[in-house]
């Protein structure tokens, strides 16, 4: 059962009763004060004491002209709570010696001694358990750097990820960042589970906007709340009790280059209803208790700013269990790597491509195709022999001395012969651990060939290296043995974006003019109509590719997602990887920390970073009037729906209705529509009724098949064809697409 949020009516209107109780207590207070005043007057006359003196502690702190020292035992706590300096007030002996107490108070100049906090050197001041480096991310692990766009630089120690007998993790690549990932998880570890009623599930995202929600994430610069979900890590292991993080996942990208604040309130409890304790350092700052720790006093002004900000946004300091801030990495840092490679690629290959070979030409392979062409093409190479990027002082990849070659495949439909005129070009993106050649020649059977012929398009594809076929072996054999080798995936994904940029230029230039490919001597491709169609991995990386392309006018992104290290651990593709992960890195908390850290490495090519360039901040040479269509398969076991919907919010698309379910943060439209970006949903009920993936952060036990099967539904392919040809999105369903 979900909680009732603070301030919400808990059954009936209790205000009249509350006012009556308040009135009754006020009346008693007045009567007591009257009696106290008479007694106080007598005492004062006998002792010659002047309780009205400004120096009197009770008068100054309590603003109580009629304070009766005989009753101090009853109001000590009130004095202390109001900030009264009672260090010289011997309230315990007030009943025995009123006069001495008054005289002592009148002459008391003592102050409260600062407290001492036993801080662990190098650890986060706000650690909530024995886990030294959490909460993460935190400004504690960011140092000032006036040379960076944000003014800070990440500063994580290598000990952040203790790997036991496995190779230690080099934090150097992470520490080049000028902030944290705009979509990485926020981790807190209390050594106990937070009660579920306080957590915001992926289907309750509206709660993240509720005033008084016990968890909140703010953009400090704008005051805007960030959409998020919160969950306990459910990757449970018998030998690792209480090693499970509270995970707060932003489900829209935090603004790049801006400071953000995470808030937890005292409403939170564990699953047994026990309250949680604030870290002593935070409590001292919150409660304005002076310490003799110079490092805490140094950050006190900073936290006074945070407390004032939170007070203005409905979170008074007394309500806070914990709050802290961090800087999100800048646009320059996150996008500069890929954009610098893109610039070089277009300078060298723009309009023509670079070198290429034709290794195979199949004429009339079936009733739909006139020709299948296979070969290799040349690209500027940024990968070393170890499949890593090397960066210069501006964090731009360094071009390698020799170019690289990659495979391509082109299919030409019969319409290229029968129409006798140039056709649109569709760059195609394959699924995870697949390759472009297999998809264009046999995915599945001749379905893609029939679609190309009926739609009237020429298609070309290469491999999304990093997560194509063969990369799974590299992940298991190399990365699992040494997590520093994550670059096999992250850096190769960046190179793959460059490859697709160059391939597009080649297809529109030298390749289509090759006599071995041309039909009847006329141009094959209309270079004013260049589109993209990607499925699964091709939808994910295609989101990034379309965003930075100077050519793609329309893009279809089928079953796409974003935020790789949110997506993969919830995907069925994680299952074989998890076997090795659990064996080599068995601590669940270590795994979550690794996921949080390595998302920064994925950010350079992740659509959560690059899709801001699609509509919000398009590049100068971006095609005018660009459009995208996203297709979501409900209950997807390979690409979780929450990552598809996060991508949709990141791009800024609208939701086609009637839909299977609403998507928080998206406006709604009805079919047909011509717009910048549209999300459509499909529910293959025969499959989802058999199995739905878990909502928690564990991979599905089986693949229900909706991820692949959705792509081949007749109405799905018809929607793709109409959009590709006309730019109009039509929902070919009678009501919500379930599936027809």
Image (cartoon, rainbow, N blue to C red):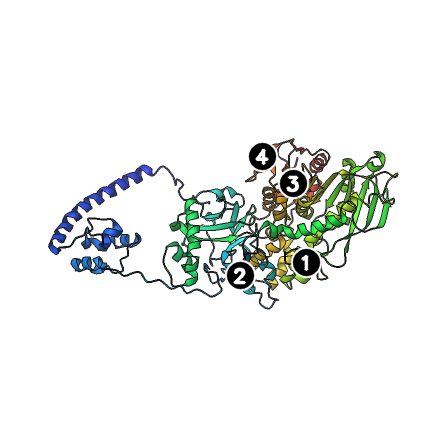
Q: Are marks 1 and 3 in contact (CB under 8 Å)?
A: no
Q: Earlier in the sequence, mark 2 or mark 1?
A: 2
Under circle 3, the secondary element is: strand
Q: Position of residue 514 (x, y in %)?
A: 85, 45
Task: Point out the frontmost of discs 2 and 3.
Answer: 3
Neighbours of disc 3 within 10 Å: few (<14), some (14-19), many (20+): many
Task: Tell me how far mark 4 sits from mark 1, CA to CA.
Answer: 42 Å
Inspect this view and state whether residue 30 appears: yes
Residue 718: name its quadrant: top right
Q: Are marks 2 and 1 in contact (CB under 8 Å)?
A: no
Q: Earlier in the sequence, mark 4 or mark 3?
A: 3
The reply, left or right, for residue 400 in relation to residue 237 is right
> Residue 630 bears which disc, if any?
3
- Label 2 sits on residue: 238
- Label 1 sits on residue: 389
> Residue 689 bears which disc, if any?
none
Q: Earlier in the sequence, mark 4 or mark 1?
A: 1
Q: Earlier in the sequence, mark 2 or mark 4?
A: 2
Q: Quadrant of the C terminus?
A: top right
Q: Are marks 2 and 3 in contact (CB under 8 Å)?
A: no
Task: Tell me how far mark 1 sits from mark 3, CA to CA.
Answer: 31 Å
- Label 4 sits on residue: 668
Q: Earlier in the sequence, mark 1 or mark 3?
A: 1
């Amino acid at each position: 059962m979900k909680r009732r949020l603070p301030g919400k009516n808990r059954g009936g209107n209790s205000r009249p009763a509350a006012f009556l109780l308040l009135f009754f207590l006020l009346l008693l207070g007045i009567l007591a004060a009257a009696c106290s005043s008479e007694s106080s007057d007598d005492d004062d006359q006998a002792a010659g004491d002047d309780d009205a003196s400004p120096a009197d502690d009770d008068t100054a702190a309590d603003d109580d002209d009629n304070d009766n020292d005989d009753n101090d035992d009853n109001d000590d706590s009130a004095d202390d709570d109001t900030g009264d300096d009672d260090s010289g007030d011997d309230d315990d002996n007030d009943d025995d010696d009123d006069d001495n107490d008054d005289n002592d108070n009148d002459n008391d100049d003592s102050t409260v001694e600062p407290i001492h906090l036993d801080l662990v050197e190098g650890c986060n001041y706000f650690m909530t358990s024995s886990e030294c480096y959490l909460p993460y991310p935190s400004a504690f692990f960011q140092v000032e750097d006036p040379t960076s766009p944000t003014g800070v630089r990440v500063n994580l120690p290598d000990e952040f990820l203790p790997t036991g007998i496995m190779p230690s993790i080099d934090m150097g690549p992470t520490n080049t960042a000028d902030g944290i990932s705009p979509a990485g998880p926020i981790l807190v570890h209390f050594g106990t589970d937070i009660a579920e009623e306080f957590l915001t599930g992926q289907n309750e995202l509206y709660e993240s906007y509720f005033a008084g929600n016990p968890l909140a994430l703010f953009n400090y610069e704008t005051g805007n709340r960030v959409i998020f979900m919160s969950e306990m890590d459910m990757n449970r292991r018998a030998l690792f009790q209480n090693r499970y993080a509270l995970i707060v996942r932003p489900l829209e990208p935090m603004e790049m280059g801006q400071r953000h604040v995470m808030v937890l309130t005292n409403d939170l409890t564990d699953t047994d209803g026990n309250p949680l304790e604030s870290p002593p350092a935070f409590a001292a700052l919150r409660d304005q208790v002076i310490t003799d720790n110079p490092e805490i006093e140094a950050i006190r002004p900073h936290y006074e700013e945070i407390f004032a900000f939170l007070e203005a946004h409905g979170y008074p300091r007394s309500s806070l269990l914990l709050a802290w801030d961090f800087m999100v990495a800048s646009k320059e840092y996150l996008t500069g790597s890929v954009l610098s490679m893109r610039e070089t690629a277009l300078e060298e290959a723009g309009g023509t491509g670079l070198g290429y070979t034709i290794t195979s030409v199949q004429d009339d392979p079936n009733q739909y195709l006139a020709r299948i062409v296979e070969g290799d093409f040349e690209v500027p190479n940024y990968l070393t022999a170890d499949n890593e990027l090397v960066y210069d002082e501006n964090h731009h990849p360094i071009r390698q001395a020799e170019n690289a070659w990659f495979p391509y495949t082109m299919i030409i439909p019969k319409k290229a012969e029968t129409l006798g005129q140039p056709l649109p070009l569709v760059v195609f993106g394959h699924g995870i651990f697949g390759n472009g050649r297999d998809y264009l020649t046999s995915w599945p059977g001749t379905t893609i060939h029939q679609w190309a012929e009926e739609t009237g398009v020429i298609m070309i594809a290469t491999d999304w290296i990093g997560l194509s076929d063969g990369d799974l072996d590299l992940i298991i054999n190399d990365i699992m043995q040494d997590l520093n080798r994550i670059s096999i995936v992250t850096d190769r994904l960046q190179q793959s974006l460059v490859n697709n940029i160059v391939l597009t230029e080649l297809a529109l230039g030298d390749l289509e003019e090759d006599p071995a490919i041309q039909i009847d001597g006329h141009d094959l491709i209309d270079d004013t109509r260049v589109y993209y169609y990607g499925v699964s991995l091709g939808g994910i990386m295609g989101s990034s590719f379309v965003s930075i392309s100077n050519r793609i006018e329309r893009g279809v992104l089928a079953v796409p997602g974003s935020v790789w290290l949110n997506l993969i651990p919830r995907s069925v593709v994680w299952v074989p990887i998890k076997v090795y992960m659990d064996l080599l890195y068995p601590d669940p908390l270590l795994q979550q920390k690794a996921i949080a850290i390595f998302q920064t490495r994925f950010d350079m090519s992740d659509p959560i970073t690059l899709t801001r360039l699609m509509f919000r901040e398009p590049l100068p040479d971006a095609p005018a009037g660009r459009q995208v269509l996203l297709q979501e398969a409900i209950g997807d076991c390979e690409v979780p729906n929450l990552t598809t919907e996060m991508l949709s919010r990141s791009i800024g698309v609208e939701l086609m209705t009637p839909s299977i379910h609403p998507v928080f943060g998206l406006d709604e439209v009805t079919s047909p529509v011509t717009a910048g970006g549209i999300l459509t949903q499909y529910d293959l009920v025969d499959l989802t009724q058999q199995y739905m993936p878990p909502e928690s952060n564990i991979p599905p036990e089986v693949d229900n098949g909706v991820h692949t099967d959705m792509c081949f539904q007749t109405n799905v392919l018809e929607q793709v064809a109409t959009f590709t040809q006309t730019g109009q999105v039509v929902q070919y369903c009678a009501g919500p697409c379930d599936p027809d």
